[in-house]
Amino acid sequence: MLPFLLTSGLTTGALYAMVAIGLVLVYRSTGHINFSHGELFMLGGFFAYSLIMFAGLPYVVALFLAVILSFLLGVISDRLVYRPLIKAPGLTMVLATVGFSYLLKGIGRYFWGGKGEYLSIPAIVDPAPIFINDIPILPQQLIVLGAAVAFMVAFALFFSRTKAGKIMQATSENPTASYLVGIRVENVYTWTWGVGAAVAGAAAVLMTPLTLITPDIGATLLIKAFAATILGGLGSMTGAVVGGFAVGLIEQLASGYIDTSLQEIAAFLVIMVVLVFRPAGLFGVYGQRRA
Amino acid sequence: MLKLISPVPVFCSAAIFAAALPAFANQYTIFVGNLAFIYIILTLGLNLLLGYTGLLAFVNAALFGIGAYATAIARTKFGIPYGFALPLGGLAALAVGVVVALPALRLTGLYLALASISFAQFAVWVFAHWDPVTGGPTGIRMAAVAYGFSGSWETVHYYVSLAICIASVVVTSNILRSRVGRSFVAIRESEVAAEGLAIDLTRTKTTAYGLSALYAGIAGGLFAPILTLVVPESYDLFQVIVQFAMVVVGGLGSIAGAIFGAVGLIGVQEALRATKELQEIAFGGMILLTVLFLPSGLAGLLRKYLPEWREPLRRRGDDR
Amino acid sequence: MKRRILDLGALALVGGLFLQGPAKAEVGVTDTEILIGALGVLTGPLYHNGKTIYDGVESVYNEVNAAGGIHGRKIRYVREDDVCKPDQAVPAAKKLIHEHKVFMIHGGGCSNASLAAMPEIVQAKIPWVITASTAPQLTDPVNPMIFTTMLAGWMETEGQLQRAIDLGAKKIAIVKQKDAWADSRYKPLLDSMKARNITPVADEELSPDPTDATAVALKLKTSGADAVIGVLFPKAATVLMRDMYKIGYRPIVVGGSAISDLKAMDQSIGIAGSLDKFEALAPTKHPDDPSVAKWKDVVKKHYPSDTFMTWHLFGVASGEFMVAALKKAGKDLTRESLAKALSDLSVESAAYPGPMTCKPDNHQCYRSMAWFSLRGGEVKQVGVTHLK
């Protein structure tokens, strides 16, 4: 049983990691947690559904268009909501993203809710399982796994090697000082919200064949992504991916060896237990960032 | 000169209006009024944590549930009359709140927020899975409260909630005027400076958690009978969000803000029923509009247009 | 003298009021309109259980209204959202009764929400016809005003168990969700099994919104079960079927009323043969059945953005039932006359495979279910069970 559980733990963990990457990206640059990230994911999936099912576009084209639409959604939300609140208290920003998540959920339900119990798009590859050492894996899961690692590496390099990446980190560390050295903080934020939404959209296109989407999927995935980022320490891209795998594994092992009722609560228990013993996450340094 | 637009006269007239309401309102309006009182108590409690002590803890939805469950269990399983079951609900929440506070003391900021949201979800899971005690997903059914007065028990319950709500406002206001209240705010402004003033961080924070839990538990005890059914889904993530929205929309660190926030959001929630299938869009949109145009809440309006409005330990300016 | 005249006047007035009593118009009924309230879920994760059903009900009402209404009265259907939660159901019921002043309530999809609203509706003594809530306490013991056109939870699981046995199951396992919807089926299922001296070889839990069910599938496989009874929502069932197929475990699976859309399941899994041994029940016929094609068009006409689903058929059947009851209650429509008409009524709807029959001592008016299976990519009705 163990090899099966480990494999499915890693493949579900990759799903959580994909969502967590977008969350960390926004946090790294703005210092805010985007509570509407799950709903951006949901809409990205619905965009892809409509592009494939109604516009009849091929999967790869739909992927790109859905990502672009998600990016635009992120930019629009920045202009409408986040930019006016740039100087508001942090808690107000939390409530704004929560409010935005309800708005998006309602929009998702209004346009796509009546189309079925849940929606899905065809997998990019043959959906039948393949066997590696007699352990079955769905090919789409391998794609998500690969994408999660690729995104992680790309963003880690972006933050450490490129000027844009360093600017984004600077705006988060100290917005006022960033203004003083000539960084247009508002524009950095606009890009961040846009790219964050685009990452959610990309994750959705790759994951929808596996997770199936409903207007309510956002909250479920968001909470798992939270657990992943907490394990990895808020703000660490590598940590988020490792955390995602860890949450996936813990869920599967708890469910397989203790009780299946623990599967849905495992992520919350992880967050609580980790924070009680390591108040800044497994890989975080306490006191490094107080948001 | 007698200042009419100051907290005490305004609060008294609001209380008198609330007391007179049942005379010309139907059962639906009375129910909504009762709900508003319960949420005022909750918001006052949560505001002690979020607004005054500056702790981003979202455990109150769970403690609200624990108060409701404890009251219902005391009544249905042990036959304890409601008059005793209600304070028992408050005490149960207080006990859990203090126990939860101990590990939470080490946490601050977003870490505390996420840990406490996790606790709230865990509590809902326990409500749903601890079948012998909580009745599982089907919950606990509770008979109407026999108050021994003639007429509708719900109207009597309305007055009980009103009385406890008024008492909570008065007690909160007095706590904030005391040394304890000033210690809360000192911690919010700077933990280091507070320690320098010989404020015991552990004890003060635990007091804040405990007080807040007591408010939530009592509110839960008042909430249980008006639904007749205590079930896990009443205390889920949406409950966390509603209470949080009430505090922020009303204004952090203001008693008047807590009242405005609770009454306003309950009113809006009921008004939004008219939007039917678009209720989520309307709810989200309403929150967005409020934070966009009133980033420091309704209490911010008070500060702006009524500078003579004095409240204990009110926040000055932004809390960033 | 003057005073006596006043007294007499007052007496006459009071007497007049009393005499007027029986003839006065019923609440929510005018010469041209009947106001009916829908209490149920319109938003939140379980909205299909309300919104889509009411689209079905209202499609029937719209057709009747277009044809001139019932005894000259048009039906106006006003919806209030209970979000599938008691804390929203109570104010929603109060609003329907005290603000809208409806004649009756036609709706109710979530058991916990309906149970919370029940005391209010009972106290108001207004007729209530339930469209989808399955808690048996709603109609048992019999309340003279409350009726249901949906199966009770225990009937479904009784049917599922019998079906599994009929299909040759020897070792039976259960997979259920942990919520009120599933609980009202799971507990009676355990009772039904006990009555037949069957012990479940495994009893596992799956969340309604899972991303993976490998661990559950593995546990079922190790238990050696040859049949699995699923008390699950469609998404959970789909993920479970996929992951059971993935690990090479192919038992008989018998699903409940929520998962009869086998075609959507098949398309989402995308692996040929993964649903070969899956059967699900529904209180309704299948949305693709030729006999409901008329309703498919009607619903499409009134709700163009809806995809026609099983849920609409719940509403269509219940709507047709209500129309028959209102016709039978006659021109002088009162709550009492409607309750009387309802308490002895039998209606056939194209949407249901069996009749809806109410008796004075039994307000659980529906007891039939159809079985569906996927044969060659198309959904086929493979059987019908009528419970006593």
Image (cartoon, rainbow, N blue to C red):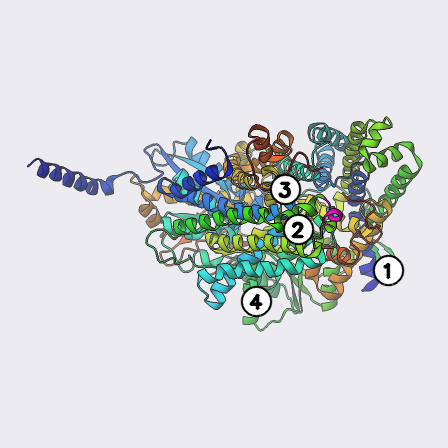
The one nearer the camera, C221 or A24, is A24
Give the percent coordinates (x, y) of residue A19.
Answer: 77, 44
The one nearer the camera, C254 or C87, is C87
The amino acid type found where label 4 is placed reads Pro
State the residue lying farthest toward the right: A161
Q: Is residue B232 above or below residue B17?
A: below
**Residue at the spot x=46%, y=55% of the render?**
B225
The amino acid type found where label 3 is placed reads Gly
**Chain at tag 1:** A
Q: Nearer the viewer, mark 1 or mark 2?
A: 1
**Residue at the spot x=68%, y=48% of the render?**
B55
Q: Nearer the viewer, mark 3 or mark 2?
A: 3
Q: Which residues are magenta?
A: B190-194
Tell me the residue that label 3 is attached to. Answer: A116
Q: Nearer the viewer, mark 3 or mark 4?
A: 4
State the residue lying farthest toward the bottom: C197
Secondary structure beneath dot 2 equals strand
State the residue lying farthest toward the front: B1
> Which of the two labelled residues, at mark 1 and mark 3, occupies the earlier sequence position?
3
Secondary structure beneath dot 4 equals helix
What crowding class fits label 3: few (fewer than 14 Cα within 10 Å), some (14-19), or many (20 or more)?
some
